[in-house]
Amino acid sequence: QVQLVESGGGLVQPGGSLRLSCAASGSIFSINAMGWYRQAPGKERDMVAAITRSGSTNYADSVKGRFTISRDNAKKTVNLQMNSLKPEDTAVYYCKMNIRTMYQLELDYWGKGTLVTVSS
């Protein structure tokens, strides 16, 4: 089986920074796209940032210039550096990976989420 585990969430003041990490483990042959999504209370889950295997990135307009996504293919990890955080960034953040397993199945996997709270 495949598991994704996020870390790095917490409470931060407006204007502060946090770094989220997500590590994949299990029967993995290769990982295609990786991404971060977030869901605020009462809202839908939205894409925050995504990165292809080759390193091309895509960001939601609301985080451009403040957030940076990166990946380490060898370590099977994806990171999200979040700077200049705002109260509206408060949400549960989920990582998602499109993974080809050792059994040659290609599926989307999600982590369980990590809470980010931006408040003074």
Image: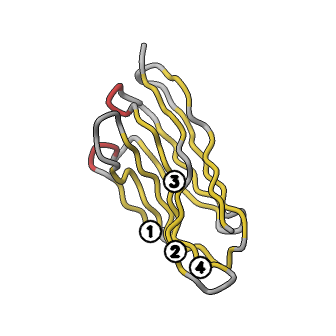
Q: Name the element at disc 4.
A: strand
Q: Name the element at disc 1.
A: loop
| Residue at 57% across, 73% down | 99
Of the image marks 4 and 2, the number of the one nearer the N terminus: 4
| Residue at 33% across, 47% down | 64
Q: Amino acid at mark 3?
A: Cys
Judging by the rendered image, the residue that carries numbered circle 4 is 100
Foreground pick, 68 / 96 = 96
Q: Name the element at disc 2.
A: strand
Residue at far top of view: 120
Of the image marks 1 and 4, the number of the one nearer the N terminus: 1
Mark nearer the viewer, 2 or 3: 2
Neighbor class of circle 2 (other Cα within 10 Å; few <14, some 14-19, many 20+) is few
Of the image marks 1 and 3, the number of the one nearer the N terminus: 1
Judging by the rendered image, the residue that carries numbered circle 1 is 56
Tell whether 28 sits left or right of 14.
right
Residue 107 — which label? 2
Of the image marks 2 and 1, the number of the one nearer the N terminus: 1
Foreground pick, 100 / 49 = 100
Q: Amino acid at mark 4?
A: Arg
Label 1 to label 4, Cα distance in Å? 19 Å
Foreground pick, 27 / 37 = 27
In this rendering, the answer to whether 105 lies above or below 28 is: below
Q: Amino acid at mark 1?
A: Ser
Judging by the rendered image, the residue that carries numbered circle 3 is 95
In the rendering, at what x and y percent does residue 107 appear? 52, 74
If the image is split into quadrants, where does the C terminus sit? Answer: top left
